[in-house]
Image (tube, grey):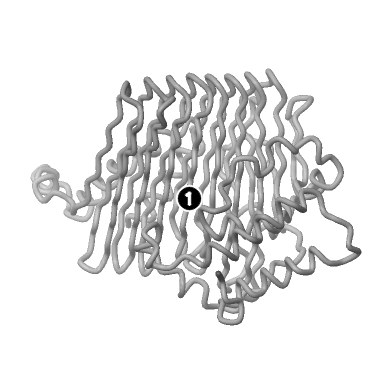
């Protein structure tokens, strides 16, 4: 149980805001029962510490130390949108400022008829029946306090719905803007529903305006109908004052194909949780990520693929490069339930450590209860191989360039999983800058 008197300011402010949300005119909010259950789960779970196995290498105390205030209302500036843009990406633009959908700053031209882009909070208030079967339906509130805290608020974010049979040709680029003149916390909630045989590609980028510390507690739910195709990419690059915890939760029906990739460059302490549930026969789940850490940065990647249906496939690849005093963590689990016969699951984690004070921890796990499966995992962590550097130097390449070339090749395996060429170019440029 969380002792709120002793809890960090972030949590006290969050609970104060929650109390306000439940008071007011006394009218029950949509999904009030779920919110109350989330609050109970939040208080019962307690704040994770390094004594919890799943948080063994991630000490959140420095990130929670600032006296965060909840993000207020704001509007995006041209400079914000430019900072969050990706050169050459022809996409519909959805802008979320301080956790709230900004319709005026968004540009939805070119989206097919029937595609809905709206404020999640507005949708919950005005059309609760539309999201009743998907909103919060698959999030395990007991798994961690931050998911429960986010679920307790039901504040705002994006509601994206692609109807049955519709293929959205243009990618949808979600630009998150967070204003931070003072230490600021924001909790954003997205609900993405892609119907049967529909297709969508979503790219998320993040911008912080201001130089104060920030803490994001984001939760994105992705529901894919039968034979749906979803490509989801996040690029975290907000600066070393940006801290946070996120959860991407997917749920897939039969023959659907969903991938979610996370690229993390300049941040502070970040914990990225991904939970994928291929729940229908023949589903394909792909998750991957790359993190390049400098200074005192800490990036913790925690994944769970829960195979509950037969004949599904999952592929997982995460890579990390750590230098200075930074830390990279990968903790991934593939769970194959008894009914999930003929599952094919592969999991790989690789880390490169470039300095004596940097650390990379990796813990891949398989837990299998079916007897007709193909599952494997692998993990490697080490330095750059000296003979590889020597080989390039023997051909006239300087040592610095040789090391950069090897690291770029190491990282590019994950970039190749991105299907959008402008996004690959953007990632290549950022990797090159981070490896200088």
Work out which quarter of the rendered image holds the N terminus and state it.
bottom right
Neighbor class of circle 1 (other Cα within 10 Å; few <14, some 14-19, many 20+) is some
Q: Residue at x 54, y 50 (%)?
A: 247
Residue 282 at x, y percent in the picture: 48, 19
- Visible in this render: residue 6? yes
Badge count: 1
Q: Residue at x 73, y 29 (%)?
A: 110
71 over 116 or under it: above or below: below
Residue 159 at x, y percent in the picture: 72, 41
Q: Which residue is mark 1?
A: 273
Q: Nearer the viewer, residue 360 or 386?
A: 360
Residue 361 at x, y percent in the picture: 28, 56
Q: Nearer the viewer, residue 398 or 368?
A: 368
In this rendering, would 33 be left or right of 179? right
341 over 243 or under it: above or below: above
In this rendering, would 11 be left or right of 311? right
């Amino acid at each position: 149980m969380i002792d709120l008197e002793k809890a960090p300011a972030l949590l006290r402010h969050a609970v104060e805001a929650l109390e306000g949300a439940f008071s007011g005119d006394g009218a029950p909010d949509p999904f009030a029962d779920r919110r109350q259950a989330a609050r109970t789960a939040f208080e019962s779970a307690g704040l994770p510490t390094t004594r919890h196995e799943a948080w063994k290498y991630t000490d959140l105390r420095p990130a929670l130390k600032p006296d965060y205030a909840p993000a207020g209302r704001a509007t995006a500036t041209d400079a914000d949108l430019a900072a969050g843009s990706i050169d050459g990406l022809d996409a519909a633009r959805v802008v979320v400022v301080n956790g709230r959908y900004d319709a005026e700053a968004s540009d939805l031209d070119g989206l097919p008829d029937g595609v809905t882009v709206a404020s999640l909070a507005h949708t919950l208030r005005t059309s609760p029946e539309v999201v009743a079967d998907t909103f919060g339906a698959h999030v395990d509130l007991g798994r961690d306090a931050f998911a429960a805290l986010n679920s307790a608020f039901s504040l705002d974010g994006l509601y994206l719905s692609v109807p049955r049979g519709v293929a959205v040709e243009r990618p949808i680029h979600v630009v998150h803007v967070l204003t931070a003149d003072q230490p600021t916390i924001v909790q954003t909630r997205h609900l993405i529903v892609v119907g049967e045989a529909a297709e969508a590609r979503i790219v998320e980028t993040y911008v912080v305006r201001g130089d104060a510390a920030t803490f994001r507690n984001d939760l994105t739910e992705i529901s894919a109908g039968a034979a749906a195709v979803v490509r989801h990419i996040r690029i975290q690059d907000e600066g070393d004052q940006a801290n946070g915890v996120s959860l991407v939760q997917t749920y897939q029906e039969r023959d659907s194909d969903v991938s979610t990739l996370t690229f993390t460059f300049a941040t502070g302490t970040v914990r990225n949780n991904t939970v994928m549930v291929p729940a229908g026969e023949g589903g394909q789940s792909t998750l991957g990520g790359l993190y390049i850490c400098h200074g005192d940065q800490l990036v913790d990647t925690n994944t769970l693929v829960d195979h509950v249906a037969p004949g599904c496939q999952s592929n997982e690849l995460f890579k990390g490069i750590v230098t200075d005093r930074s830390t990279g963590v990968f903790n991934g689990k593939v769970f194959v339930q008894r009914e999930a016969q003929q599952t094919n699951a592969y999991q790989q984690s690789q880390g490169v450590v470039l300095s004596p004070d940097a650390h990379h921890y990796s813990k891949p796990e398989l837990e299998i209860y079916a007897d007709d499966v193909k599952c494997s995992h692998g993990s490697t962590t080490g330095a750059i191989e000296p003979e590889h550097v020597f080989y390039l130097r023997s051909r006239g390449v300087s040592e610095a360039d040789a090391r950069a070339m090897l690291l770029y090749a190491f990282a590019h395996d994950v970039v190749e999983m991105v299907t959008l060429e402008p996004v690959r170019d953007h990632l290549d440029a950022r990797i090159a800058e981070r490896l200088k």
